[in-house]
Structure formats: structure tokens, C-alpha cells
Amino acid sequence: MEFDEIDTIAVLGAGNMGHGIAEVAAMAGYDVMLRDINEEFVRNGYEQIEWSLDKLAEKDQITREEADASLDRITPVVDMEEAVGDVDFVIEAVPEKMDIKKDVYGDVVEYAPDRAILATNTSSLSITDLSEVTERPEQFCGMHFFNPPVRMALVEVISGAHTDERTLELAEDLAEAFGKTPVRVRKDVPGFIVNRVLVPLMNEACWIVEDGTATMEEVDSTVKFDVGLPMGAFELGDQVGNDVTYHVLEYMNEVLGEAYEPCPLLEETVEEERYGKKVGRGFYDYEDGEGAQIPTDETREDVKLRLLATMANEVGHLVEGDVAPPRDIDQAVMLGAGYPEGPAKMADNVGIDALVETLEELYEETGAARYAVADGLREAAESGGFHGGDEDENGVEFTTISVEYPRENVGHIVLDREARMNTINADVLEELSAALDRFEGDDDVRAILITGKGDRAFSAGADVSGFAASAEPLSAIELSKKGQETFGRFEETPMPVVAGIDGFALGGGLELAACADLRIASDRSELGLPEHSLGLLPGWGGTQRLQRLIGMGRAKQVVFTADRFDAETMADWGFVNRVVPHAEFDEAALDLAERLAGGPPISQMFTKRAMLRGWEDIDAGLELEAQAFGHLMNTEDLMEGITAFMGDRDPEFKGQ
């Protein structure tokens, strides 16, 4: 089956995950059969979709017409034959019990057409075992969506032992059509990628408290305010459900061995039915207490090393088992768990040698199998890190941005932190500067395009959570200067720079866009400087450049109100040069960059210099303009331009 032949999708199970997946599929334009075992269940799921679509329309994230059309594409059914009898793709999202899922697939294969691809939304069960009851295991794979599917960007696409490559490709294409980011899980292992990293981390947090090394408050303080993760480990356990964590660990323990033995503290919590937030009590008390009140100042370096070593060891196991490469692991965990950086990158930053040493000391002290160093981690230590082979010729590792060459003479920088709305931290600044070094040293690059990955944001600004752990005046000053210097380089580079804005361009994102020579935006974009709402001010040049572009009065309106402004308004004010429909954005941005790349490089360089100099001192700008005008008279580009004009053809400038 070809991908464009997929029109109708059956979603089996109308619970939280099922109705969420059905909603996503319908919003992407697919006809959806939503099935559950009785009328009440399927009706509840359908009504939840209707409520969700209404909320999206109320918030102007979709139009009312789009909401109504999406709902019209969904057919709630109970009968299995009606649900799957004429569909192209089946996504099963029934309760996480092997026997229940196997029973469902027994019915599915009786009625589903031979062409249909079958996918399970399991978060931990064996893809291979499930596939073997379908009579078409080569057409079976895992598609693990994350909760809630409407908001979460990640889909783990998992291969079973019998899965055909074409099946995986179709599942990945479908995930992308849903607006999601698929990450391939090459082998069927418990926990796949994200849970394989998260669950042992939460278990190790329990062991740290169990053996008296630190208190729960110290662990969560370290995780949240030193490691910089979105939640403390115990806070996350309560959010996910401690019973869920425990059952996944039991399965890992059964399949992978004693290294995944659940900690007695976790077991005791589950036995006492303290499952977490959903029941009012977990590690924290949400009913009679204040919930997770995590101190900001009880961080511990030994706790940090122990937890990072645990995560790094799991990455090592995944890499050595060829489950996924480090970059994919990082992307999956950032998208699926909201980490500011991936676990492989965090391990590299701390130093693999220090983490190996931590594990070796713990293993010698306790003899516990969970501290045995993975071969993949030792190999990473020997090669200079998990990302040791991803460096460019100048020794810079691109992990927060990607560098591409999509059109002739165009260098493309993609801000690649989709899980964090492409927010900017110190690593991003360093890599932006390195990418500019690469382009400026490449004679084949004559224009630069900067965009953000995904469909939510160009960049939502500075990564505030990443800076919070080290918020000191002197370091903040240095960070401001670093951003000013990095962004300023794009303003000063000889090549034309285009900022392609699709979605949010807020704070530091808008400040970066302000350094471009031209800005093109999709019609759904929102721009603003929200720093005053945080008690800050724009610190990466926003107080200076914005007033140059739109005037002081309007610049003050943007800064002081901290409001968001649509692309059309910012175009009227002169910040955005062109607004295009969202569907045309990618092509229009590349076309604009390609057009500028075909211009006369020497003229462009001198023009940028003269305009920048003249803003500061008009006399100096005029003098530079005159000198440049004279210099250009002796260039081959001028003769090419005149010859092309006389011959009524497009010039081919060579920068000579």
C-alpha cells in the first residue's frame, strides 16, 4: 500500500488515549472509526473529542469550521466489523493488558482487509508477542503516542521482530501527517526509549531515599533545580501514577533481569494505594497537604551524579542494543518528557568518565546489578561522548540546531528544540555562532535562512527554566552579552539573512528575527516580547533593534504591554516583510532565501555595511556608501549585471 492510499483509520478504544488519537487523526483530514466495547464508552469518547475541539476553536488554535469538519469525520461504533471492515490503518488503544489486546486482535484480523496496517499504542508490552496473534505480523508495529495526544509531539514507532520496513515507513509517514514527530525504535525492548530512560530514573530516586543517601526533598530539589528537569523525580512519579511506574518496572524486571528490581519504597507506596495525584496521595499529599512543594536550595552534587549516571547507563544499553542512536534517544526524551536537553547530551556535558566512575563505585559498594556499567556507556567514554562523532570540522557538535543546504547557495539553520518550543539557551547560542562560521567559510553559501523545527514556534524565546538554576547577576550579564554578540553576527554577516517565522516568535526568538535582513511569516504566527511579564527586559538586543524597525512608540508598546501581535499587525508596522498562508510558508521562505542567494554578493555585503554604519552615524554611512560605489565599478559582477540587463536575461553573479 502507498501512503497516499491511506484514507480511513480505525481507532480501537475510546478512552483518554484512544479518543485523543482519533481527534488528531480527524484534524489531519482522515475519516476515523472510533470503536469501543459498548455504546456508553464510545459516546463518552466522542463527547470528549467534541469538547476538546470546541476548546481549540475558542482559543483560536483552529477555526470553528475546522472543528466542525474534524468532528464530522469521526464515526462512533461498537460493532467490530463495522469499525475495521473497510479501513486502511488500525490503531489499537485498549487497556494495557496483554490478554485484552490479544483478544482484540483476534477479532480485528477476522474483519480487517488484507491491506490494513495494524499498530498498537502500547507503552511497554511486546510488539512481537502481539503481532504473532494477527496472522500478518509483517504488517504490525507499535505507534506509542504520548498523553495527551493532541498536545504531545512524539510518536515512538516500534519495530517488532517480524515487522516489514514498509510498515514502519507508513507508520512514520502517518505520524508526520498527524503533525507529530516519529522516532524509530529499531528493536522491541521493554519501555522502548522514553520509559526505558524515565522509569529506571524514578526507581533510582527511590533507592537513594531507601538507602538513606538523601531525603525525598533533596532528590527532587536536585532533579528540578540543578539537573533542570521539568519535575522532580517523585513529583513526576505522582503525576504519571506510581502504580504505572511499578508495573512497568515489574515487566522490565521480568524481561531484562534484576537490574530493574523495583525499590521497596516504590513497592510500599503502591501497596498502600498511594498512586499519586489521581487519588490525592502519592509521595506527596495532594488531598490534605500542599502537594509537591519542592525546595529550591537543597540540591546535592552526589545525587545529581548518581541520577545522571543511571540515565546515561540506560542510554548505553539502548545504543549497544541498536535500539536507537543517541540523537534519536535525545529527541524522543525531549519530546516525550519535556527535558531541556536529551539524556545523552546531558551525560556528555557532565562527562562520561565521571558517570562511569560513579557507577563503578556504587557497584563495588553495593554489588547491585543496576550499577553494572553498560558496554555502550564505556564505548561512549572511549570515543569522547555519545555525540563524539557528531562534531563538525571545527569540533562543534550540533545538537540544538541542524544545518542544512536545501537550495542552491542557501544555508539553512533550523532551531532544533521542538519539545521546548525551540527556546534558546547557551548551547544554542554557541551552535548558532558555529553554524555562521561554517557558512561564512563556505563560498557556495550566499544567503542564510533561519527557521524553527515543528509547527508551533520559530522560537518561544529564552529557555527560562534552563537559566533558573544559575540565576546570578554576573552570569546573567554574561548571558546577555553572549546573546547580543551572537545575534549581532547575523546582522553583520556579509550574506543576506532571512528569518522564517511560523508560529510563535517571542522574546529571544523575536530578538533573533530582528537581526535578519528580511522576515517572512505565516499568517498564524504570533510575535511579542513578554519579558516585562516576568519582571525582565529584552536582553539580546530587543531594546535597540525593535525601535529601529518599527519606531520607538510602537517598540515601547510591544515591550511594555508584553502582548502578542499577529503577523499582519507586525507587517503593517514594518517588522515583517511578507505574510503568507501557513500552507505556503515552507516553500515561500526557501524561495525568498534562494532569490537573495542569487543576488550580487559584493553589492549585498557593502549595502549591509553601509546601512548598519549609517544607522549609527549617517555621515559615516554615506562615506562608506560612496567608497563602496566606487569599488563596485571594478567588479566582474557589475559587468555581468549590465550584460544580462542588455541581453534581457537573469544575471549570474559570482562575487567577483
Image: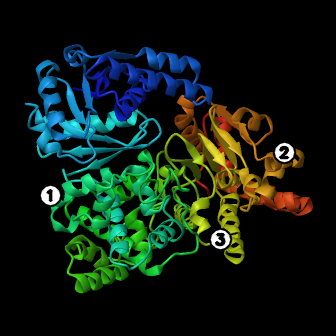
Numbered mark located on residue 45 in the image: none
Quick one: label 2, few (<14), some, or many (20+) residues within 10 Å? few
Whether residue 456 sits left or right of residue 363 in the image: it is right
The amino acid type, in three-letter code, at marker 1 is Glu
Q: Is residue 66 above or below residue 471?
A: above
User: Can you tell which of label 1 and label 3 is closer to the viewer?
Assistant: 1
* Residue 522 image-quadrant placement: top right
* In this rendering, the label closer to the viewer, 2 or 1: 1
Q: Earlier in the sequence, mark 1 or mark 3?
A: 1
Quarter holding the N terminus?
top left
Q: Badge 3 local density, few (<14 within 10 Å), some, or many (20+)?
A: few
Q: Nearer the viewer, residue 214 or 80?
A: 214
Q: Residue 557: which numbered mark, if any?
A: 2
> Where the C terminus falls, by quadrant?
bottom right
Q: Which residue is mark 1?
A: 254
Is 565 above or below relative to 2? below
